């Protein structure tokens, strides 16, 4: 354990920390170095430290859309789950959230303030930063619809700047942030003010109930594994092949929702990679469609 100190910060950089506890799949080997900053100053200092050490640097949010190699990750992993908070203006509908703020927390806060536009987000166990990167969505809503702008910090620089919604090249589960080395620091949303608070809270609650009843919330997963090859639904294609319940090691295609792979019994990342490949091959052989994953992978030479 090292202390990274300056006149502004004093933050611990920990060595060889198991990352399974930092992902919702509960798999993954150790980070060579891991830190959990709580401020922009700490994030900047950590990036500078990684540069000086000449080691790679990667960002982790809630780990809800992440597959980490069993061998772990080289370099510095910066987990932003403690870098959180939000500000809400109920009158004009402006919301600003720090990147580590959990989506469900922000969705509930917005509903209690009478702001319409984030009810869909209550069941997604991710962070604001991750939602911007992935253009996360559910039940007919998605991040890009209400997003106005984000603040980012390049991993190869120290100057913070703003990107407008139109700058981010949003598409289905995609933004330019997936290909460029930016750290999302915060996001601004414009929601609709003046709605009935009780009705919004009830709608938000019902959305959560629906997700829990149709998805395997009781077991570790990463959410939906595959992007939908529109107009088809990945889950339906997999289910129609009779693959629900198929296992490799401790990884299983969920019996509740076929687009989920769940960790039923101490699954390894290798189990999950093999099960993903099995599903891709089966769907391509039968339907002629290659299913692409939504999942971000760290520590692998190639994407699965």
Image (cartoon, rainbow, N blue to C red):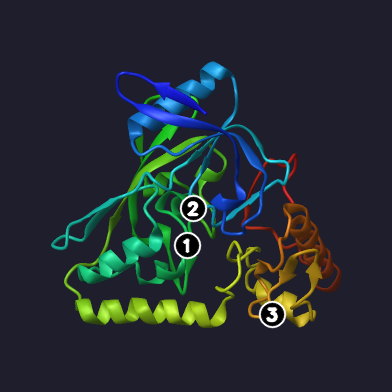
Q: Are marks 2 and 3 in contact (CB under 8 Å)?
A: no
- The answer to whether residue 14 is left or right of residue 248 is left
Asked whether the viewer can see residue 87, the reply is yes
Q: Secondary structure at mark 1?
A: loop
Asked whether the viewer can see residue 232, the reply is no
Q: Secondary structure at mark 3?
A: loop
Q: Work out whether 121 lies above or below 239.
A: above
How far apart are the alpha carbons under marks 2 and 3? 25 Å
Residue at coordinates 62% horizontally, 59% vertically from top-left?
Answer: 25
Residue 246, given in percent of the width and then of the height, sits at 79, 74
Residue at coordinates 30% horizontally, 18% vertically from top-left?
Answer: 7
Q: Which residue is mark 2?
A: 62
The residue furthest right is: 285
Q: Work out whether 29 lies above or below 143.
A: above
Question: Which residue is at the front of the view, 243 or 35?
Answer: 35
Question: Which residue is at the front of the view, 187 or 10?
Answer: 10
Within 10 Å of disc 1 (Cα), the crowding (few <14, some 14-19, many 20+) is: some
Q: Earlier in the sequence, mark 2 or mark 3?
A: 2
Residue at coordinates 63% horizontally, 73% vertically from top-left?
Answer: 231
Q: Earlier in the sequence, mark 1 or mark 3?
A: 1
Residue 121, given in percent of the width and then of the height, sits at 41, 67
Q: Are marks 1 and 2 in contact (CB under 8 Å)?
A: yes
Residue 159, given in percent of the width and then of the height, sits at 37, 26
Within 10 Å of disc 3 (Cα), the crowding (few <14, some 14-19, many 20+) is: some
Q: Which residue is mark 3?
A: 255
Q: Earlier in the sequence, mark 1 or mark 2?
A: 2
Q: Which residue is mark 1?
A: 125
């Amino acid at each position: 354990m090292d202390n990274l100190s300056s006149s502004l910060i004093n933050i611990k950089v920990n060595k060889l920390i198991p990352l399974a506890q930092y992902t919702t799949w509960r798999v993954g080997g150790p980070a060579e170095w891991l830190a959990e900053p709580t401020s922009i100053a700490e994030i900047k200092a950590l990036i500078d430290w990684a540069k000086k050490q000449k080691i790679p640097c990667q960002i982790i949010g809630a780990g809800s859309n992440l597959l980490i190699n069993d061998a772990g990750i080289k370099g510095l992993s910066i987990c932003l789950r403690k870098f959180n908070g939000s500000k809400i203006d109920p009158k004009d509908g402006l919301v600003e959230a720090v990147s580590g703020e959990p989506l469900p927390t922000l969705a509930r806060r917005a509903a209690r303030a009478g702001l319409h536009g984030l009810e869909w987000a209550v069941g997604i166990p991710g962070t604001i930063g991750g939602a911007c990167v992935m253009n996360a969505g559910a039940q007919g809503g998605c991040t890009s619809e209400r997003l106005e702008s984000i603040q980012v910090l390049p991993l190869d620089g120290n100057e913070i700047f703003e990107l407008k919604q139109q700058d981010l090249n949003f598409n289905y589960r995609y933004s330019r942030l997936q290909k460029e080395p930016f750290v999302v620091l915060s996001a601004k949303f414009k929601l609709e003010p003046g709605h009935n608070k009780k009705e919004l809270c009830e709608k938000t609650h019902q959305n959560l109930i629906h997700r829990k009843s149709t998805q395997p919330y009781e077991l570790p997963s990463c959410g939906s594994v595959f992007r939908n090859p529109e107009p088809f639904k990945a889950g339906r294609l997999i289910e129609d092949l009779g693959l629900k319940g198929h296992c490799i090691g401790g990884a299983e295609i969920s019996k509740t929702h076929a687009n989920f792979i769940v960790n039923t019994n101490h699954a390894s990342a290798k189990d999950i990679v093999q099960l993903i490949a099995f599903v891709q091959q089966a769907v391509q052989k039968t339907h002629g469609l290659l299913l692409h994953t939504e999942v971000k992978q760290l520590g692998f030479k190639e994407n699965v």
